Amino acid sequence: HAVIKTPKVCKIKLLRDGKTIANRKGANYMEISIKEKGIYIDDFDVENKMEEIAKQNNMSLFDFRTLLIKKGELKTLKEKIKKRLEITKLLSYYNKNITKNDVQNYYNSHKAEFIVAQKIDATIYSSNNPDTLKQIKENPLLNSSNIEIKNMTFEYNQTNPKLMQFLSKVKTNSFSKIVPISKDKFSLFYVTKKEGNVTLPFESVASIIFEQLSNKENQKAVQDLLSKLKAKADIQFLN
């Protein structure tokens, strides 16, 4: 915990994913920084983000909005999205742009990270209850109507590169960790066989590398921003 004592307090919680939330107590210097930069998020930006969230949940924007209205959460979500977009845009002022050369250089010097099995056989257990999948890990012969089971073969040139990286790290005849595959569905993989090794081509992992580098830069941007805010307020880092 680091506290700089001054008359005004601005609490900032730094989350694991690099996102930052500013809670007002006295002066909210995050909001002041947003205004100083002339950052403006309009309804069109918010609607685009809502549509993206809807797609991630296999819903149309109309159905998503209807659901939120029924729950009385539409206004709250729109306000949260607007604030998140403002903060993301603010961080971009402290974040260097990742170039294609940066991505290529990372790939060239970290090729071991992109070595995966050419082919993987696995049994997939899926359920809307992660606790049920935990029971499967303890007792693979458990029979439950809440579990969907299917056997699949994953080939590196026909499978999402992230999934191939994930499955390649799982030992043969072992379970993976339980992972969310949608808002209300989880999966558990049991790897039964692996064949060969191959380095994923640059084109298939460029977006993954870009995301990794961007996340690192976002972390640096958060630290830079917090350093600038320290001079103006009492910053309390909350775990």
Image (tube, rainbow, N blue to C red):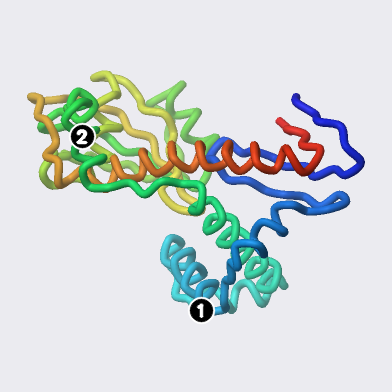
Whether residue 11 sits left or right of residue 102 in the image: it is right
Q: Count the numbered circles shown.
A: 2
Residue drawn at (47%, 34%) of the image:
133
Q: In the image shown, does 22 or 54 lie closer to the viewer?
A: 22
Q: In the image shown, does 66 or 108 lie closer to the viewer?
A: 108
Residue drawn at (36%, 39%) of the image:
213
Q: Is residue 145 visible?
A: no
Q: Decide: few, some or many residues near mark 2? Use Cα within 10 Å; few <14, some 14-19, many ≥20.
A: few
Q: Earlier in the sequence, mark 1 or mark 2?
A: 1
For the residues labelled 1 and 2, the Cα–Cα distance comes to: 36 Å
Q: Which quadrant of the figure has residue 231?
A: top right
Pinpoint residue 214: horizontal percent, then vertical percent.
39, 44
| Amino acid identity at mark 1 | Phe
Seen as rendered, the residue at the extreme right is 7
| Residue, disc 2 | 105
Question: Are the two marked residues, 1 and 2, in contact with CB atoms closer than 8 angstroms?
Answer: no
Q: Is residue 58 visible?
A: yes
Whether residue 101 sits left or right of residue 236 in the image: it is left
Q: What is the number of the mark on residue 44?
A: 1
Q: Decide: few, some or many residues near mark 1? Use Cα within 10 Å; few <14, some 14-19, many ≥20.
A: few
Q: What is the number of the mark on residue 217?
A: none
| Amino acid identity at mark 2 | Asn
* Front tag of 1 and 2: 2
